[in-house]
Image: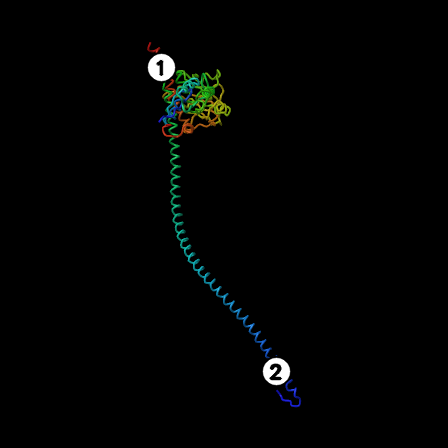
């Protein structure tokens, strides 16, 4: 059985560590990236089953990264936008860039895990 | 016949007349008897019909009586069945009552487990926040990394993008802005004095301050403070974190976990800043 793969993208080490700890409880295979550009590159090789994507990042922000991922072979991979910007226009922009769901910071661990599991299933261990 | 010898034909005539009268009477009697016979015949016929009808009634009555007997038996059977079913129904209702009691108990237990689960999840989340905060503060001796860790903790774990981090200059009454997140702070916000009439008393008190909105405290740069976290190094005041506002999704509400993070920052951030300062001096000291 193969573990589900999740790519976490955030320029904040604190946010990365927090999301990683939350997902570790379900034993997903996790990879991290600290910019949108790095996320697009790592997604191509890691082939994640789901992407957690921050919005405000250097080089390439989350919106641009989502568009780039949607234009690649990973057009069907669920993207959850994780953002401090909870305003409606930002959320709408995220959806228009190809995000499937959004979570606002500070992240509620239960909410984040539930939304991830809603895409990847609730099987123990995050296995396919 | 009376004899009348004076007229030879008179006797015959008289006999004839008498015979004719007699015959008329016989015919009349005959007719009466015929009518009587007809009448009796009709009566007899009626009696026969009546007898036949009675017989049919009797047969029908017998059939109906049998039917009544059958129906009575059927009713008695149904009554018995009904009683059995009522008894079964009472037994099932009793069982249903017990099952409902068990279900209520299970629902109550589930609610209790759910409440405990949520409590555990909340505590687990709080511990994760504190662990990440502590890990990040002390994860690197690099000064920029420590300041970044303080900002990131406030942004990602508390929920604010309007923060200033001040560090005290030695034993002086001045604190200098060493890190911020949000809009570029004005020049007047670069320095914070312990003698400031507004913020000074809060720093001197040395405990966490959260604005209740009623009596706003104006910080450096003329902006109202939402939170002030004095940074302590032992018993010494070594700096402060000033939070000017929370993210909209926080609804201007600080939760217990936020206060715990502030408390941890108050006791650990100064030590991390001090360590980073020592680390920066280390090459100079060793040389």
Crowdedness near tag 2: few (<14), some (14–19) or many (≥20) residues, C-alpha within 10 Å: few
Please identify the residue farthest to the top as the structure is shown: B287
Residue under the image location 43 percent in, 58 percent down: B70
Q: Report the chain holding disc 2.
A: B
Which chain does tag 1 point to? B
Q: Secondary structure at mark 1?
A: helix
Disc sitting over residue B279 in the figure: 1
Q: Nearer the viewer, residue B100 or B250?
A: B100
Q: Nearer the viewer, mark 1 or mark 2?
A: 2
Look at the numbered disc 2 and give the secondary structure of its residue: helix
Q: Nearer the viewer, residue B17 or B270?
A: B17
- Of mark 1 and mark 2, the one earlier in the sequence is 2
Query: In percent of the image, x 50 and y 66: which residue is there?
Result: B52
The answer to whether marks 1 and 2 mark residues whose Cβ atoms lie closer than 8 Å is no
Residue A59 shown left or right of residue A29 in the figure: right
Residue B80 visible here:
yes
Pick the quarter of the image with the C terminus of chain B. top left
Query: Is B284 positioned to the left or the right of B160 in the image?
Result: left
Q: What is the distance, in whole Å, between disc 1 and disc 2 at their CAs? A: 180 Å
Residue A59 rendering spot, x and y as whole percentages: 45, 16
Tag 1: Cα neighbours inside 10 Å, few (<14), some, or many (≥20)? some
| Frontmost residue, B123 versus B110 | B110
């Amino acid at each position: 059985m193969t573990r589900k793969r999740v790519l976490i993208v955030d320029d904040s080490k604190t946010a990365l560590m927090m999301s990683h700890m939350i997902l570790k409880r379900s034993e997903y295979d996790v990879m991290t990236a600290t910019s949108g550009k790095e996320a697009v590159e790592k997604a191509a090789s890691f082939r994640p089953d789901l992407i957690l994507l921050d919005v405000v990042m250097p080089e390439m922000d989350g919106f641009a990264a989502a568009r780039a991922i949607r234009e690649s072979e990973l057009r069907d991979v669920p993207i959850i936008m994780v953002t401090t910007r909870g305003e409606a226009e930002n959320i709408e922009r995220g959806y228009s860039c190809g995000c499937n769901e959004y979570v606002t910071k500070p992240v509620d661990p239960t909410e984040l895990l539930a939304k991830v599991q809603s895409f990847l299933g609730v099987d123990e261990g995050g296995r396919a | 016949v009376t004899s009348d010898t004076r007229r030879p034909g008179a006797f015959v005539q008289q006999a004839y007349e008498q015979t004719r009268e007699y015959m008329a009477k016989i015919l009349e009697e005959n007719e009466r008897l015929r009518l009587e016979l007809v009448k009796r015949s009709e009566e007899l016929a009626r009696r026969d019909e009546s007898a036949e009808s009675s017989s049919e009634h009797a047969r029908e009555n017998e059939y109906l009586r049998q039917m009544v007997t059958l129906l009575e038996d059927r009713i008695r059977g149904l009554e018995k069945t009904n009683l059995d079913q009522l008894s079964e129904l009472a037994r099932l209702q009793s069982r249903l009552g017990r099952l409902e009691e068990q279900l209520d108990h299970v629902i109550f237990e589930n609610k209790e487990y759910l409440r405990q689960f949520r409590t555990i999840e909340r505590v687990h989340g709080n511990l994760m926040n504190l662990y990440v905060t502590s890990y990040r503060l002390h994860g690197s001796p690099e000064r920029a990394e420590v300041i970044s860790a303080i900002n990131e903790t406030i942004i990602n774990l508390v929920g604010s993008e309007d923060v200033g981090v001040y560090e005290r200059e030695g034993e002086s009454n001045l604190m200098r802005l060493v890190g911020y997140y949000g809009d570029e702070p004005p020049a007047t916000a670069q320095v914070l004095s312990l003698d400031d009439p507004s913020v000074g008393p809060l720093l001197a008190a040395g405990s966490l301050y959260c604005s209740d909105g009623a009596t706003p405290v104006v910080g450096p740069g003329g902006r109202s403070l939402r939170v002030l976290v004095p940074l302590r190094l032992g018993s010494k005041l070594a700096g402060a974190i000033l939070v000017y506002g929370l993210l909209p999704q926080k609804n201007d509400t600080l939760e217990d976990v936020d206060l715990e993070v502030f408390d941890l920052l108050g006791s650990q951030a100064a030590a991390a800043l001090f360590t980073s300062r020592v680390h920066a001096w280390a090459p100079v000291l060793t040389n």
